[in-house]
Amino acid sequence: MPDPFLDACTLADMVRRGEVSPAELVEDAIERIERVDPQLNAVIRPRFDQARREVAAGLPDGPFRGVPMVLKDLICSAAGEEIHEGMALLKQARYTAPVDQELTRRLRAAGFVVVGRTNTPELGIVPTTEPVAYGSTRNPWDTTRSTGGSSGGSAAAVASGMVPVGHANDGGGSIRIPASECGLVGLKPSRARVPLGPEWGDVFGGLVCELAVTRTVRDTAAVLDAVAGPAPGDPYGVPPPARPYVEEVGADPGRLRIGVQTAAMGGTVTTHADCVAAAEAGADVLTSLGHDVEVAHVDVLDEPEFVADFVLVWAAGTAFDLDHYWPAKLGRPVGPDDVEPLTWALADVARTAGASDFLAARHRLQVTTRRVAQWYEDNRFDLLLTPTIAEPPPRLGEFDSPADNPLHGLFRAAELVPFTPAFNVTGQPAMSVPGYWNDAGLPIGIQLVAPYGREDVLLRVAAQLEAVRPWAHRHPPVSV
C-alpha cells in the first residue's frame, strides 16, 4: 500500500493511473484508524461500512476520486446520518440530520470517501477538543497536550496519518488553531468562499467559514478548488479567483510587502517566546526570498471593545442554538442540565444583553472590518504575519469549566488565541502553516493574513515557505 503520509493529490493521481484502487485506499485508512485512534480518540463515529458500500456502488469521477477523508462532527451534515456537534444531548437522542449540507455534497462530488466523524468541543466553543460527550482528543505529538479546537479531532487524524484530509470549520480560529498545534496546513477562506447552505445563510453573523486541515499546501489549494463557489441564496458575495487555486502553488508571488506582528492583539497577553521565534523564523525566510518584511502593528484591533463585541456575537449564536435551533429540531426545550456549564453560561451572556446591544456590537465589528481593510491600504501591506496562537499546545484539562466557574474556559481561550478571531470578524482569508518545532518537539504554527478575497496570495507565499522549510516529512510519535 502507499506511504500513509502521501498527500491527497498524490493518492488521487495514483487512482487515476490505476496504481491503487479506491477500495484499497479505504481499507488502508480503516486499518490505520483502528490501529492508531485508540491512542488519540479523534474518530468518534467510524463510517466504515458506509464507505465500503459507496466505493462498491461507484464513485463520482471527481479530482479526489477514492481518497479517504474524515468529517468534523459540526455543521457539515449528511442526510440520514447522525451529527452531535459535541453535545451529549444529541448523542443520547441519536439526532439524525435531515439534509446534506452543500459542502457535504461538494466533497462527495469531488470523489472523497468519508470514513468517519471526528471529535469536536460542544458547539465548537473552546479552542480545545475535550467534550463531555466523547472525551478528550489527544495530540499525536504529545498525548498529554491538546490538539486545539474546535477541529481538533480532524487535526489529530490527519497529523497521525490516518487520512490525508480532514474537514474543519472556523469561527474564531478553529481551523488554524488545530493546524498550529498539530503541525498542519489550515486555511480559513474568505467569508462566503465556501457556502454554508442550505440550512444556514451564515453562522454567527458571518464568523464561521468551512474548509479543511491538510499536510501540504497543494492539498489545501486543491480542496478549495473542489468546494469553493456560490450557492443559491448566499447572503454574501466574494470575488471569484482568477484561475484554479492549485495553480497558485509554486507560482511567483512577486516581491511583497509583509508586516510582522508578534505582540498579541489587545495587549493583555504576552506571546510565548517559542511563538515569537516561530514568527521571526518565518519572517527571516520571507526576507531571504526577496520580500520586504517589517515590523507592524494593527492598532485597530487593540481597542478593548473589540473582544467584548466578538464575545457577545458568539454568545448570541450560542443562545440561538440553545433557545431556538435545537429545540425546534428536537421538539423540546434545551435546559442547563442538557449542556456543559460553559455553554449555558455563554448563552446567558447574550440573554442578559438586549437586542440593541447585539446590533451595536455587530455595528462596531463591521466598522472595525472597514478600518482593518483601510490599515492594509494605508500601509501598503500585501500580507500580515503573526504567530497563530500565543503559546505552545496547552495541556489537556486547562479549559475545564466547572459549574462554580463556568466561564473559565472562555477566559483561558482568550489567553491562547488573541491572533485568530479578528479575521473571522473581518472576513479575510487567514492561513496557519507549520513554522517551527520547539525544544519539546511541539509544533508551533505561523499565521498569514491577506486582504479579503486574496487566497491566491496566501497560497503562493505558503508554498514558498513549504519549499524552503518543508514540514510534511515530520511525523509525530503517535502515528501510523
Image: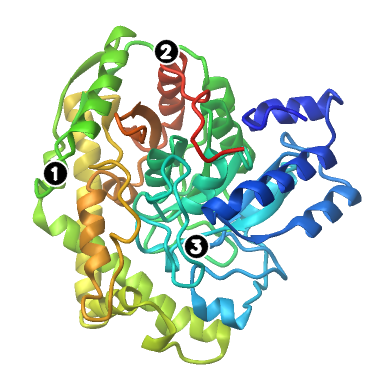
- Visible in this render: residue 211? no
Q: Residues within 10 Å of mark 3 (few under 14, many from 20)?
A: some
> Which residue is depicted at the point 80% across and 58% down?
49
Residue lying at 72% horizontally and 36% vertically, measured from the top left: 64
For residue 300, the mark is 1
Is 333 or 243 nearer to us in this picture?
Answer: 333
Above or below, comparing residue 290 to residue 253 in the picture = above
* Quadrant (top left, top right, bottom left, bottom right) of the C terminus: top right
Residue drawn at the location 44% of the way across and 67% of the way down: 131
Q: Nearer the viewer, mark 1 or mark 3?
A: 1
153 or 104: which is nearer to us?
A: 153
SS type, badge 1: helix
Q: CA distance from mark 2 to mark 1?
A: 33 Å
The amino acid sitting under disc 2 is Val
In this rendering, the label closer to the viewer, 2 or 1: 2
Q: Nearer the viewer, residue 400 or 154?
A: 400
The local crowd at label 2, few if under 14, some if 14 to 19, many if 20 or more residues have their Cα within 10 Å, is few
Count all numbered tags in the image, as a single digit: 3
Question: Could you tell me how far apart the alpha carbons at marks 1 and 3 are, in whole angstroms?
Answer: 28 Å
Q: Choose the circle earlier in sequence order: 3 or 2.
A: 3
As drawn, the label of residue 468 is 2
For marks 3 and 2, give the CA distance.
40 Å
Which residue is under mark 3? 201
The answer to whether marks 3 and 2 mark residues whose Cβ atoms lie closer than 8 Å is: no
Q: Quadrant for residue 340, please give it.
A: bottom left
Instruction: Identify the coloring.
Output: rainbow
Could one spot residue 204 in this view of the protein? Answer: yes
Along the viewing direction, whichever of 95 and 363 lies nearer the viewer = 95
Element type at mark 3: loop
